[in-house]
Image: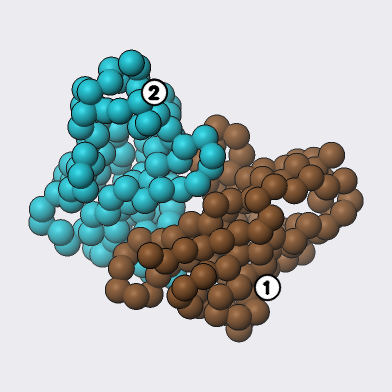
Amino acid sequence: AQKITQTQPGMFVQEKEAVTLDCTYDTSDQSYGLFWYKQPSSGEMIFLIYQGSYDEQNATEGRYSLNFQKARKSANLVISASQLGDSAMYFCAMRDYNQGGKLIFGQGTELSVKP
Amino acid sequence: GAVVSQHPSRVICKSGTSVKIECRSLDFQATTMFWYRQFPKQSLMLMATSNEGSKATYEQGVEKDKFLINHASLTLSTLTVTSAHPEDSSFYICSAPYAGGRYEQYFGPGTRLTVT
């Protein structure tokens, strides 16, 4: 069975500094997709970044980059130049292509950006 | 871009009543939609996969008779919480994968259900 693990319940970062949110995954599939979502207090799920299992380069989207270590089965999110508006819950997720494409989520990390 | 809407955004109901939550894909067709439940400070847990024109697939431990799912068209899925109890109070979110060549799923804004 697929599993996503986020071991950091909460993280603090100083404004303008970079922060790394950890995510490890477990799957026996060769083809999978890894996602990061941001969830502010409003509850909406905001897509941040995607990494396919066959992508050779790490994904980047503006201030977000995904450090994909396939052999270690890790997909850490790096946020550069943190902003106060980055304070939110962050979820790592894996897409199960064998079961209709449903997403399996990690436990989440609550990020707080300090001014 | 693709948008998924949910209605209502908030609902308060009395114990024992039923509540219907609608999930609509606004500018794309979704043969599959997913329903998640999220308790405070917890992750999203998949409840069921809604399939247009066929029965929903429920995750282990989710009561199909309590959480009725109907995917009546390519743009609408509904979740009905029957005989709601206070422990059903939660944040319910639907999502739909976009089949237009992109990879991400689009999430609705969620429905906060409070059962008194």
* Residue A71 to residue A56: above or below: above
Q: Do the residues labelled 2 and 1 touch (CB within 8 Å)?
A: no
Instruction: Categorize mark 1 by other alpha carbons within 10 Å: few (<14), some (14-19), many (20+).
Output: some
Q: Position of residue A40 (x, y in %)?
A: 47, 37
Residue designated by label 1: B70
The image shows a total of numbered marks equal to 2
Looking at the colours in the rendered structure, which chain would you say is drawn in cyan? Answer: A
Is residue A71 toward the left or the right of residue B33 in the image?
left
Q: Residue at x 21, y 58 (%)?
A: A53
Residue at x-position 35% and y-position 61% = B104
Which residue, given by chain and number where applicable, does mark 2 sit on? A112
**Residue A95: x, y in percent?**
37, 59
The crowding category of the residue bearing disc 2, from other C-alpha atoms within 10 Å (few below 14, some 14 to 19, many at least 20), is many
Element at badge 1? strand
At which x and y percent is residue B106?
44, 60
Q: Residue, x 30% and y 41% (percent of image)?
A: A24
* Chain of the residue on which disc 1 is drawn: B
Viewer-closest of B64 and A14: A14
Q: Mark 2 lies on which chain?
A: A
Give the quarter of the figure containing the C terminus of chain B.
top right
Q: Chain B is drawn in which colour?
A: brown
Q: In this view, does B63 lie to the left or right of B34?
A: right
